[in-house]
Amino acid sequence: MYLYPVRKLTGILLISVYMLSFAELHNLLKIPVLLEHFKEHKQEDPSISFWSFIKLHYFDPIVVDDDYQRDQQLPFRDTDCCIVTTASVCECLQVSVEIQPLSEQSKEFYLFNEINKPQFTSFDIFQPPRCA
């Protein structure tokens, strides 16, 4: 009887860790911003539902309007953050890659010649027997 709550809590913990491994933690911390922004939209238009709010901000094309900066603060809006250094501060590593031009490659082409064909290939075992 005593193990049931421990198993339940262990299951909840494992599922939480599994789900958080796919989500960026700093975006989960922005969920109160999402709810606050929904309240702002609800004050402007009382008939808006939460689903239409989500559709407006995540599924419809991005519109640059008066509250564009506020829209950019919503969770899962972009993937700019690479490393979370503190609870809500994101930093990206600046990686610069220099592409070197390809050197002159030889323009010799080697054609497959029956003389150079190996005696045994891996597909020889799947052929029917031959009469000698």
Image (cartoon, rainbow, N blue to C red):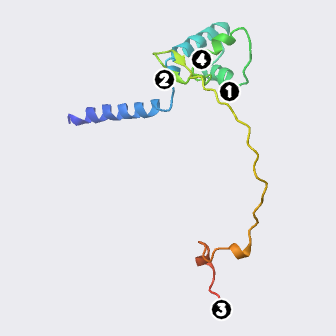
Q: Residue furthest left?
A: 2
Q: Nearer the viewer, residue 121 or 126?
A: 121
Q: Which mark is residue 59?
A: 1
Closer to the observer: label 3 or label 1? 3
From the viewer's side, name the closer residue of 11 and 1: 11
Q: Tag 4: Cα neighbours inside 10 Å, few (<14), some, or many (≥20)?
A: many
Disc 2 vs disc 1: Cβ atoms closer than 8 Å?
no
Instruction: Decide which of tag 3 and tag 2 comes sooner along the chain.
Output: 2
Which residue is nearer to you in this view: 34 or 23?
Answer: 23
- Name the residue type under label 2: Leu
- Residue under label 2: 25
| Nearer to us: label 2 or label 1 | 2
Could you tell me how far apart the alpha carbons at marks 1 and 4 are, in whole angstroms? 13 Å
Find disc 3 in the rendering and name its residue: 131
Q: Are marks 2 and 4 in contact (CB under 8 Å)?
A: no
- The earlier-in-sequence mark between 2 and 4 is 2
Position of residue 16 measured from the top left corner of the image (x, y, whole percent): 41, 30
Nearest-to-viewer mark from 4 and 3 = 3
Q: Secondary structure at mark 1?
A: helix
Q: Nearer the observer, disc 1 or disc 4? A: 4
Residue 20: x, y in percent? 46, 29
Tell me the quarter of the picture where residue 72 sits: top right
Q: Amino acid at mark 3?
A: Cys
**Which mark lies nearer to you, 2 or 4?**
2
Cα separation between marks 2 and 1: 22 Å
Local packing at callout 2 (Cα closer than 10 Å; few below 14, some 14-19, many 20+) is some
Q: Position of residue 52 (x, y in %)?
A: 66, 22
Number of the label disc, if any, that sits on residue 74: 4
Question: Distance between the Cα atoms at labels 4 and 3?
Answer: 74 Å
* Badge 4 amino acid: Leu
